[in-house]
Structures are given as structure tokens and as C-alpha cells.
Image: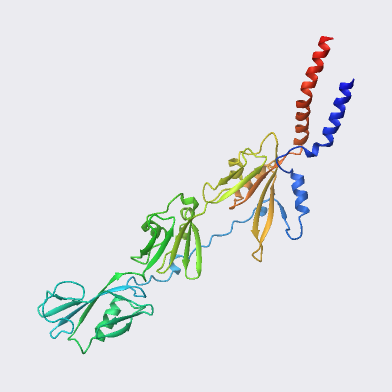
Amino acid sequence: MHVKNFAVFILLVLLAGCSTLPTNGPTRHQIEKSVMASPADLPIKLVQVQTIADVPVVPAIAVPSSPPLEPPPMPTDLVGAGDVLDINIYEAGVTLFSGGASAAGGAGAGQASPLPGVQAQRLPPIRVDDNGYIAIPYGGRLYVAGHTVREVEGMVRKSLRGMSQNPQVLITMGEVITNSIIVGGEVGRPGRLVLQTNRERLTDVIALAGGNRGNSKDVLARVFHGERITDVRLNDLVDNPSLDMRITPGDRLILINDPRTYSVLGASGQVAQFPFSRSAVSVAEAIATGGGVNSNIGDPAAIFLFRYEKDAEGKDVPKVYHLNMMNAGTYFLAQRFVIKDKDVLYFGNAAANQPGKLFQLISQLFTPLITVTAAVQTLK
């Protein structure tokens, strides 16, 4: 009799503490109640996903101008500050630079020309200064920035007119700065890259720089064009070739290792942080990746997705999307619902789970006591 009274006492104590039993997260009703009681400084909006109109629209990726709208490419021989010019001057008759004798082919020395009576003089390499000027012996300072190599040849020839007999000028680019870009980050060969045609696109530049390092789905290409910054994920280029923007001289390209992830919490088959397997992952795929709802403790009617979304003013607003997977239509909606970077997918705890835990605890507590009582009765 004393044993029975003790058992009843223990049962009452456990029932009173049922709400304090360990759990892996809130139930559906607890989440909905907490959302309704959210503070004014952190208002949370709860969206019941029941129709296709409740599924958030994936924002369109900023697509660079299509080829017909792109400006014509810049000349590849455009001269600017920092460029190094190799200038060769050919003179006939009375020469200004050559002494009339054939000289070795070193820089700054007169050279024999294949044409009789013509002397060739190669000037030392001349760098265009920060203000866009070069200095030509006897020709003075010339402003060459923004002109092509052919135009600079004409400027040098004109500056020597009257001092040299019909000088001919040939200029080549010794070191190219103006018609180049800077490539850095997760590429095979970071550094300065000269654009040979000025028609190179993002994928061309990455290939010329030795390709990207790491998995392309985790790599973000950030292009700096003046004050404009454009981010393009390499994996998105496969699905949307229009993102393959043209790179122009002066741009900077950085490849960043920026893997996208989402978290699965609560009563799921596997609680973990998962990387995106490709450019777009649906809620249905995320649920499957997380192992689905744990049949012992989870509630299929309580799948919640937590995320921040931009409002009309551009501010981050917390939103909670509720998906009831007990409805057949929700499975179709979940295929159209796209996961975003840093989303949290929560599997709600089943409300009937607490009594089950209680009975399990009672069983573990009283099994030894019942065994001892039965043994005593046998001895009697």
C-alpha cells in the first residue's frame, strides 16, 4: 500500500513538471504566440504559405546591359598616364638625331636603316607622366593622354617639323597601363591583365587570369567599374549567360570565396548548416537535405522559415513563413519557394511529444521499483 501511495505521489509531481521536460524547440502554437507578442522595436510578420501568392518572389539579378546597348569598345592602343612608349624616329638626308654613322642597336643609339640614306633613332623608353604629358627631345612636352598610338606618332612628327628633314615616327607600347585591369582574389594568376581586344567578358578575363580557385558555386565575382559595383556568382553564369558582362579598361575584378548556407534546426532528421548545392535551392529540397521531419518528435504541420527581407524603405524586416506539410498543395508551393543565403529552416516540435517523454520518464523510474516489488511478493 505504501508503494502505491508513493507511486501516486511521484506521478503527480511529474505531471506538474511536464512543461519543464527537455525539448528541442517550440511547438507550432508557441511560435505563433511568440510572433504575435513580438516587441514594437522588432515587429515580426507571420505569413501562412497557402497559395502561390504567399511565396516570396525571387528578386531579379541585376543584369548588365545587353550587347546591343553596350558602348563600342575603346581602342586597344589608347595612351594614358603610366604607359611606357618606345619611340623610333626615321630621318633621311640631314638628320637631327643621328650622326650619319651606323650605330649599334642599343636604346638611344642611331641604327642603320635598310633604306639608303635613312637613319633610325630609338629613343629611351618614355613614360607618360601623371598629367598625361611626354617630353620629346627638340619637340618639347606633348599632351598624349586620351590619344591613340597612331595619333601620338603624328603629334611627335609635327613637333619635329622644321628641325628634321621629313621625320617618320613609329611608336609601340612598351608597358601597358591604360588598357589593363587588376585581377585579384581567388584566381590562378592575380595581378595586372592587359586587354588585347577590349571585347573580353567576365568569363574571358577569369580564364586569362588562370581560372578561379575553389568551387565555382562558392565564388562571387565583384567588378568595380568607377563607382559602380556589380556582384555576380560564377554559378549563376551557367543559368544566365546575360550576366557575362563586358570588362573595360580600368576595371577591377576580385573573386571572393563566399559560400552561401542555410541552417536547419528543431525536430529534423539532421540539425546542421548546409551549403547551397547549386545556384538555387527550394524549400522542398532543403527539407529533404535536412532529413525531413523526425517522426518521433517532429510536427509536419509546423515547418517555419525565418529570414530578413527588405521593406519599401530598404530596411531589414524579420519575417516568418509557415508551411503546413500536412496539406498536399504545400508540397507544390515548397518547390517554388526559393531558399536565400543565411535562411533558418525550423522543424516544429510536436505538441504530443511532451506526454510521450513523460511516460518514458515514468517507465524508466518505476521499472526497477516494480521489479523489486514483484521479487518481494515471490519470496512471500
Q: Position of residue 246 (x, y in %)?
A: 42, 64
Q: Quadrant of residue 45?
A: bottom right
Q: Position of residue 35 (x, y in %)?
A: 75, 52
Q: Where is residue 257 in the image (x, y as percent from the top left)?
A: 49, 54
- The N terminus appears in which quarter of the rendering? top right
**Residue 65 seen in this snapshot:** no
Q: Quadrant of residue 362?
A: top right
Left or right: 38, with 286 as reference point: right
**Residue 373 seen in this snapshot:** yes
Of 98 and 201, nearer the camera is 98
Left or right: 327, with 94 as reference point: right
Residue plotted at (58% across, 41% down): 289
Of 116 and 137, nearer the camera is 137
Residue plotted at (78% across, 49% down): 33
Q: Where is residue 14 in the image (x, y as percent from the top left)?
A: 82, 33
Q: In which quarter of the image is residue 157?
A: bottom left
Of 82 and 313, nearer the camera is 82
